[in-house]
Amino acid sequence: MAKTVVHYLSQKFDCEPTLEAVVAKRNERSSTDMLAYAKELYAEENIFAEMVDSGAPWGDKSMDCFPTRIVRLFQMDPKFEALMMEHDSFLSLKQAYDQAIRDALAEGFSGIKCHVLERLVQHPHQVDDVQAARMFAAARGGDALAIEEVYLAIFAHTLLMSQELDFPVHIHTGCTGNPGNGLIFHCDPVYLVPFLQDDRYYRSNIVFLHGYPDIRHAALLTHSFPNVWMDLSWTSPWTSLNFSQSIEEALGIAPHDKLMFGTGQHHHPEMAWAASKMCKSGLAFVMRNAVEKNLLAVSQAQETAEQMLYKNAQRLYKL
């Protein structure tokens, strides 16, 4: 990934493809007006909106660094953790959480993000309100498994709320960037099948974020369940040299009208810019290959490219 970003920036700055050369040019360009530099990058790649996952409150000035329209996700996990410390019963916690989500959506948040797969020792399973209430005292006392049971009950409530209030629930899947912590074994989206197969959640819009290395599993679930979407974001631009393979694996299984691109940006404007360039390059390669193999017509390849680059996100987030 680092080499690809250096390569792209060396092309932009017309300098040697070395880290030292591009950093010098970048600092020279951005030192006088960082926001103008960021706007230039976004304009070059026609980035008309960006999904942002941040713990900052609505209206916080820190969001001004994004030089485009912002579509924000509300973080479920920190809110759950804070409310666990504030309430002495599961019913009180659930009511406060329910109101917090309604307030966030009223402020302007467009969806919810959670880490249900990577924060649990257990695999996701159904926990009803009676069970959660029974475990609440132990959870407040710090019992790790009891906390998970209460969390799963709140997760199930979130899925139901997504149907009532029409917002997507984004679930972190795949590697978090630290496979040595053992959590990677919990992050395969197939572990969410007990929820996906439950007809109570058939109308919950669910977005699998990132996915790598479980691209095929995420794509299969996106194919199997009409309410599941897939966002190839952690893979972009972090797995740049084989990103076209990730696109091909997803497109070979999942419906093309439920696939999207994103990036793990981490506050650097070059990352969204580089990810956009890489997505377009990889997608063009995959689509040309499909046309040359006589698997798609040119018009079909064009349609798929437009869906993945912007039309699917426009439809999901009502842009």
Image (cartoon, rainbow, N blue to C red):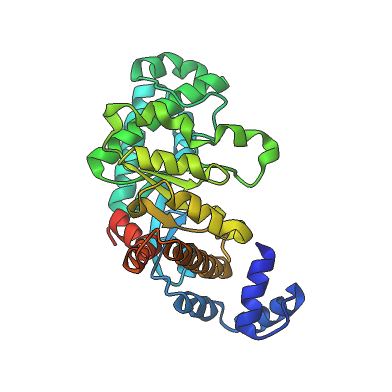
**For residue 129, side relative to residue 292 (left or right):** left
x then y, percent, for residue 5: 63, 69
Give me the residue at 60% from left, 44% from top. Answer: 176
Give me the residue at 70% from left, 38% from top. Answer: 180
Q: Nearer the viewer, residue 147 or 237?
A: 237
Name the quarter where the N terminus is drawn: bottom right
Q: Nearer the viewer, residue 246 or 263?
A: 246
Give me the residue at 50% from left, 24% from top. Answer: 147
Image position of 111 with respect to 280: above or below: above
Which quadrant would residue 60 be assigned to in this image? Answer: bottom left
**For residue 16, side relative to residue 71 (left or right):** right
Image position of 83 with respect to 69: above or below: above
**For residue 105, side relative to residue 87 (left or right):** left
Which quadrant would residue 264 be assigned to in this image? Answer: bottom right
Name the quarter where the C terminus is drawn: bottom left
Residue that sits furthest to the bottom in the current view: 14
Q: Nearer the viewer, residue 179 or 216?
A: 216
x then y, percent, for residue 26: 65, 79
Image position of 155 with respect to 39: above or below: above
Q: Nearer the viewer, residue 294 or 1?
A: 294
Say how many tags the image has.
0
x then y, percent, for residue 59: 39, 60
- Residue 202 in view here: yes
- Residue 264 in view here: no
x then y, percent, for residue 309: 40, 64
Give me the residue at 36% from left, 68% from top. Answer: 298
